[in-house]
Every structure is written in structure tokens, then in C-alpha cells.
Image: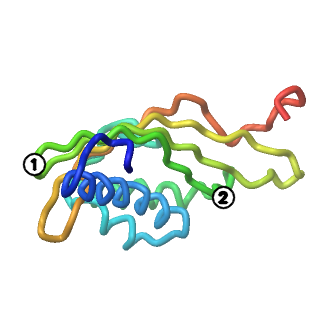
Amino acid sequence: MSGTGLSGSGQKDAHDVWSAVTGLYAAHGTGEVDGVDGRLDPEATMWHSEAEGLLRGKGDLDSLRAERAMRADGPQVTDYYAHDPVIDLSGHMAVVCYWLRVDYALAQDGTALSPELVRNTAVLRRSVAGWRIVHLHEEVRVAGGRPVAADEG
């Protein structure tokens, strides 16, 4: 995070904030629900790309997870890649703007599927437990999981 323009404790905080965000996707990618939940404040709000309304806390997130499990026949995610963070720190709060690329496995017929590109903003708060996400806003900019056109590949 040397490009943050911060020094000393500010640079360490920026590193820790970004580690909380990237750790969320690493845990999600391996199915570690506790690892995801450990990076989210239990009362976190979320504009989730798969939900119509605002998710309010762990209960709403768990309901979305249950819905997702019932429709597990869609494209299978193989990787999440969060990149290009812009981090703004102020005391015990941080705002992180970043891009997320979601990669998919080949379709059952062997067709390559396009990645999804999501623009994100996360708000984090530092506590004795470390940096936790208190709000996450996702906006899908390029829908993924669709067959790649012959001229794209």
C-alpha cells in the first residue's frame, strides 16, 4: 500500500483495512462463512448485487445465503479478485473504493464464461477486534457468468 501517500500508522491502517476487504473475498471464495462473518460487523448494512433491498445485519445476509443455496444451479465462481483500492482513513473509520472481478468455471458444455466486474465501496470501523466492514455497496458494472462470444476469446 505504499501508493497511499500515508506513512507510519496510517500506512499500517490502510494495509489492515485492505486486508479486511480482501480477506472477506478469500473467505467467501473458499466457503468459510465464519471468515466472512468475522470481517463484517454483525449489524452491517449491504447493498448486495443479488438482493433487491438493503440487507440489515447478519440475519438478512443469512437469508440471502439460504436463497442462494436453493438456486445453486448457476455458474460456479472460481475466484474473486479485489483490486485498485482507494482508501480514505479518518480516525476509527475508513472508506475503501475498489473493483472486484469475479471469475467463473467453464460451463458444463466447456464454454468459457465471462468474468463479472463489480464496483464497490466499503465502510469500515476499527474496534478492539480490528477493522470490520459496517457497510458494503456493490454495483455490477459488467454482468458475468455468460458465454464468451467467439470474438471476445
Disc 1/disc 2 C-alpha distance (Å): 36 Å
Q: Is residue 11 above or below residue 96?
A: below
The x and y percentages for residue 141 are: 53, 28
Compared across the picture, whether 3 is left or right of 31 comes to: left
**Disc 1: which residue:** 91
Residue 46 is situated, as x and y percent measured from the top left of the image, at 31, 44
SS label for mark 2: strand
Q: Quadrant of residue 95?
A: top left
Q: Residue at x 37, y 48 (%)?
A: 2
Neighbours of disc 1 within 10 Å: few (<14), some (14-19), many (20+): few
Name above or below for residue 80 compared with residue 99: below
Rendered image: mark on residue 78: 2
Question: Left or right of 75: which side holds 20?
Answer: left
Q: Where's residue 115, x and y in %? A: 66, 41
Amino acid type, residue under disc 1 in the picture = Gly
Q: Quadrant of the C terminus?
A: top right
Please state which amino acid type lies under the numbered disc 2: Thr
* Label 1 vs label 2, nearer the camera: 1
Q: Nearer the viewer, residue 10 or 135?
A: 10
Image point (45%, 34%), residue name: 119
Q: Which mark is residue 79?
A: none
Earlier-in-chain disc, 1 versus 2: 2
Point 57% across, 36% down: residue: 117
Q: Nearer the viewer, residue 111 or 21?
A: 21
Mark 1 lies on a secondary structure that is loop
Determine crowd level at label 2: few under 14, some 14-19, many 20+ residues with C-alpha closer than 10 A: few
At which x and y percent is residue 108? 84, 55
